[in-house]
Structure formats: structure tokens, C-alpha cells
Amino acid sequence: MNSNIYLNYHSNTSLDSVVKKLNISAQKPFEMATPIPAAANHSIEFYNHELVNIFNQEWVCIGRDDEIPSTGDYLTHEIAGTPVMVVRQSNKKIAGFINACAHRFTCLVPKLSGNAFVFTCPNHAWTYDLDGTLRHAPFMDMKPGFNLDQYRLQALHTEIWEGFIYITLSKNPQKKIASSLNSLHKNIVGQYDMGSYQTVIRECMTWDANWKNLIENFTESYHVPIAHQKTFANHKKPIEDYICGENNDHYCYHYAPQESETGPGAAHPENTKLKGKWRRTMVDFCVFPNHLVTLMPDYLWYVSVMPSGIGQFKATWGVAVPSEILADISAEDYDGWLSQMASYINTANDEDRALVEGLYRGSASYKLPQGTLHPIERNLWQFIRYLSQISS
């Protein structure tokens, strides 16, 4: 049976019950913190609540600004069942839209990315300019009073932060990304200048687990020395060297320096922005609810997690690299280098997948112990607090 529709003991847990459990967990001091309540990963009512109150309200990262550099370049994405797209305008700004025709709502653009002068619906050839205005609607002059100006693509709010494109389904978002993440930028990640990193990979993956299970996995590095023997464990960052960031309603992070000041994980000699330990320090952060980033001096890896069911999620991930790193790679070596980079991240994903899907299966159990958190799992406690706040 598909785990996306698999029912278990927690499936019929009421929304009120899950929220109450979350609130109890969130109110505990970190020293007494326990994991996300199991029912939050399996309750049908809570999942529907998340779709409405999280994914139809919050800002979601759908890619990188440099992926659509030219007029007419576009990216499509799906936010909890809603198809969306962003398009580079002639004034260089980015506009976001619901990816559905204003006639009878056929999905307008089926491709994941591309370039277009106009967007034409495959159903009845309604044609839109890049700014969403309706240019042409065949035979609609047969309808008395029909006016092109009264029909256009549904516009969405967009924002760019540190090279990442965010979009929200909310008509009136209560916050801005830049202001919400001001402290994170000012105190930690701004020195890396992520916005200048150049995107080299964009991929998608589907796993059989609840979307929050990947957030849990990514926001703690307690598992790294055990689970990532083929990848991240090789940077040799001792568990005791990890530092968890301040409490915040919009994000969480932790960081740790590696031993080596040169080679993978370290800043290029021509990188003059990073100083001291930061030249060899990795930062893992999560922009709530679902944007995950591993940031290093020589590359970043991001993941945007999107539920496609209670027990299944789709994650878009990408890699971006500083220009000084790319400058050292010759044209004849580039394909091999890129293949090696993709293989490295895919190996890390494979290492994590077993853990994430195992967490979903294990949390389905009828009886579970109370559980506890390690000191460097503080970010998970912060995520629980976010879930509690957004659900109350």
C-alpha cells in the first residue's frame, strides 16, 4: 500500500489533540524538550490544517534568482497542490503567478523551466504577456461585453533574499522575508554573500515520509558522524564544536568549523569576505517552514520541502558555488566536476533517506517512549515551537 494513504493509530487523531500535544512540547524548556509528537506526522486533520495555515500562508523558496536571468525566463513549482510560476520581466524584476489560465483554470505552463515571449494556454489558446495581462482570447468576441482587461493571471507576492526566490499564496502576507531574517543575515550568513553564488544543479526527489521528518533530519547534525560516513562526516567537525543559534520565530541554525583550512569546505584564497574561523565554517539553517540550507565557503546546498500527502513529500534541491571556485575549473573539466558534485549530494541524500523514511515509519507506532533531544538538537525544539505558534 502506498505510504501516502497508509492509515495507522495516529491517522484519526483530532486537530485539537495534535495542537495540544505540540503546545505541551513547545512550552517545555529545552533541557526537558521531547521530539515532535508522533501524531503530528500522521494525523489527517493536522495535515489539512498545515495546508491551510502553513503552505497557503507562509513564504516558500522555489529556486534561485540566477536560474532565470533573462527576460521571459521562468520557473514553475507546486505549493501543496497549487501550481505557481515566476517570470523575469523586462524591467529585470520577478513576477509570480498562479500557473492556471484565467478561462477555465488549465495549467498554463507544464515545463519546469524555460523561456517565453508570451504564455499560451494549450486548451483554448488564451495568450498572456509576461506580466500576466491577457493579450488574446480566440472567438471571445462572440460573448457580449467580454473585455480582455477583466481577465489576467492571478498575481502572487514574490521576494528575493540572498539569491533565493520566495513566493507566497497569501493575499496579504503578514511579514517580509528580508525583515524576518535580518538577524540571521546580519550576524551569520551575510558574510558569505550567498547571493553571488552561481547555481549549477537543480533536481527533485520524492520520499515516503512526512515533510516534517526531513526538517527534523536536516536541522540537527547529531546524526552526521554516524550516518554520513561517505560525505559530511569527512569534514571532521566534532560534535562538541557545534553551536546552536538564538531562538527565533522565523528561522533556526547551527554552525561548526572544520579542521582543515584548505580544500573542500574551506574558502578559496581569493575569497576576501570571510575572516578567521568563518573561512572553514559550515552553517546549517532552516527558514521556517520548509527551506533548508547547508552553507559553506565553497558551495551551498539548499532543499525546499513540499508535502504531496501525509506520508510523502517532494523536495526540490540545488547547489550553488562561488565564482572564484568556478573560475578554477577548466571548460574541459567542468562536466566531470559537476557530475562529481551531483554524485556527492545524491550520496548524502541516500544516506539521509533511510533515516527520514525510518523516522516516519517508527513514529507510526501505537506505543512510543517519551523521547528526548541531544544538546545540539536545539534547532528541532525551535521548529516544534514554530509549529505550535503557527497552529495556535
Image (spheres, grey):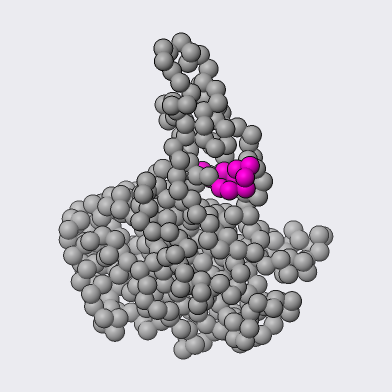
* Residue 33 on image: x %, y %: 28, 78
Residue range (magenta): 85-94
Relative to 153, residue 22 above or below: below
| Snapshot quadrant of residue 74 | top right
Relative to 188, residue 143 above or below: above
Q: How many marks?
A: 0
Residue 87 sits inside the magenta stretch:
yes
Residue 316 visible, this orientation? no
Q: Residue at x 52, y 82 (%)?
A: 256
* Residue 43 on image: x %, y %: 25, 56
* Residue 168 on image: x %, y %: 42, 50
Residue 365 sits inside the magenta stretch:
no
Q: Residue at x 66, y 58 (%)?
A: 200
Residue 245 visible, this orientation? yes
| Snapshot quadrant of residue 180 | bottom left
Query: Residue 2 or 100: which is nearer the viewer?
Result: 100
Relative to 50, residue 219 above or below: below
Q: Residue at x 60, y 73 (%)?
A: 192
Assign the C terminus to one quadrant of the image. bottom left
Relative to 347, is 20 on the left or the right?
left
Relative to 296, is 225 on the left or the right?
left
Query: Residue 227 or 148: which is nearer the viewer?
Result: 148
Relative to 7, is 62 on the left or the right?
right
* Residue 136 on image: x %, y %: 55, 22
Query: Residue 124 or 127: which is nearer the viewer?
Result: 127
